[in-house]
Amino acid sequence: MAAVVDAVTAVGKLTGSRPIVVGGLAVLARLSSAHRATLDLDIVDRRAEGQAGQLEILRKGEETSPAEPAAVTLPTRFGEVRVDVLEVNQYELDRPSDDAGDRLHVGSHAWAADSATDVTISVLGSERRELVRVATTIAEPGPLVTMKLQSIMNRGSAKAGTDLWDICRLTLDPVCRRAVLNQLEGAGPQLAADALQHVDLWFQRKRPWSLDRLAAVAGNSFATDDFDLVGELLATACQPRR
């Protein structure tokens, strides 16, 4: 974890701005208690027209190495870290796809970038026994849930399980729960509709598959009733408003 947090500082120095952190580190920063470790750093690049992309800038770094499909390997004081750059541009937002999954990918990442707030993350370096701290911009709980709902379909079994675990933890966490539900209730109609389709897919139509993936990473820490409750809460929050 120290390496991932240290990578946030390194990315900020290379790009000249605070990175917008999503993915596992953002989830851990939002929860009241950590439930898993993360080895990679995921950032969103809300790229404006004519602006150099963060991936391009990072790949020009003297000590970075390109990684596919849209990432770099970055050295830190605590070891190398893979940094995945998720780019969102205005063209994709202005000309939305006909596919709900593609729309949710673009819409949720844009939402995450536009609504992210400043957070200070602190972890203890395991080897040097020093406090590693960084102030950066972190995605809010609601956008994190919608990003995770979409990313499940593009992942292997283990990663799909951790996405489902993150969704459940964020939705039931005493600190995040109200933010998740309020933010989903306030999401745009199309984004909420696309999220609702994915809630129905993972928590209803593919429920046995989802429970198997969740159990593989979370063990017995989540009961079936808890999983069903998460599905009900998310579905209600994403329902269209009159």
Image: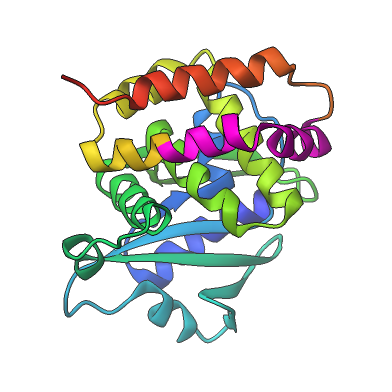
Q: Position of residue 202 (x, y in %)?
A: 58, 37
State left or right for residue 100 relative to residue 30.
left
| Residue 69, picture quadrant | bottom right
Res. 133 in view: no
Q: Position of residue 11 (x, y in %)?
A: 46, 65
| Residue at position x 25%, y 66% in the image | 92
**In this image, 241 relative to 9: left or right?**
left
In the rendered structure, does residue 40 fall within the stretch colored magenta? no
At 57% from the left edge and 15% from the top edge, which residue is drawn?
229
Q: What span is in magenta?
A: 197-218
Of 171 and 156, nearer the camera is: 156
**Residue 172's image quarter?**
top right
Q: Which SS does the magenta portion mostly show?
A: helix
Residue positioned 60% across, 26% down in the render? 169
Residue 101 versus residue 133 in the image, above or below: below
> What's the residue at 78%, 21% (across, down)?
221
Q: Nearer the viewer, residue 200 or 13?
A: 200
User: Considering the image in quadrants, where does the C terminus appear?
Assistant: top left
